[in-house]
Amino acid sequence: GSIAFAIITGVTIGLFCEKILFLWTGTMVTVSVSMKIGLIFWLVLTIGGNAVAMFLNAAQVVKFQVVTSIAMAVLAIILKFILGFYWGASGIVWGLNIAYISCLIIPWIIFLPILIKRNTTLPKVLSGIA
């Protein structure tokens, strides 16, 4: 639900972003395709990531989130400088996306099945029994 909404919203904003920016700023702004796709991708990652973060908060998994978030922030800063230097503003957005996937999404893919398997109450909660 949330991710589908993010995709629909992101694509809609991506298609009309120049018009939206014109209405907002009063000047015509051209946004590269790479930047549009990167921002749509970021929107989907953020909304999906917020759902996972809420799940981890409910499961009282805080240390894991702190460690992965700090790693993501550090990597994002480094990648934003490097990719921003070579590809401009779209490089900055893609640096964030790469850091988010590398430091949050991939660890979640590895950790969540382990968390669910270890915790005897989580499978019941997830299936709606508890």
Image (spheres, rainbow, N blue to C red):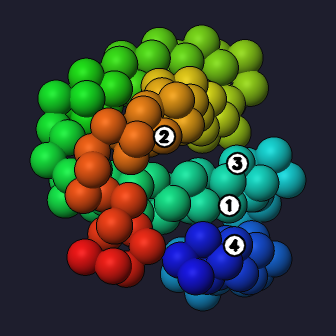
Residue 38 badge:
3
- Residue 79 lies left or right of residue 119; in this view the side is right
Pointers 2 and 4 in contact (C-beta within 8 Å): no
> Which callout, 2 or 4, points at the residue further toward the start of the chain?
4
From the image, tell me which residue sits under label 1.
40
> Which callout, 2 or 3, points at the residue further toward the start of the chain?
3
Q: Position of residue 88 (x, y in %)?
A: 67, 30
Q: Secondary structure at mark 4?
A: helix
The amino acid marked with disc number 4 is Ile
Cα–Cα span, label 4 and label 1? 7 Å
Cα–Cα span, label 4 and label 3? 12 Å
Q: Secondary structure at mark 1?
A: helix
Pointers 4 and 1 in contact (C-beta within 8 Å): yes
From the image, tell me which residue sits under label 2.
113
Cα–Cα span, label 2 and label 3? 28 Å
In the image, 109 versus 78, the foreground residue is: 109
- Residue 31 lies left or right of residue 4; in this view the side is right
Residue 7 badge:
4
Nearest to viewer (mark 2 / mark 4): 2
Q: Residue at x 60, y 71 (%)?
A: 3
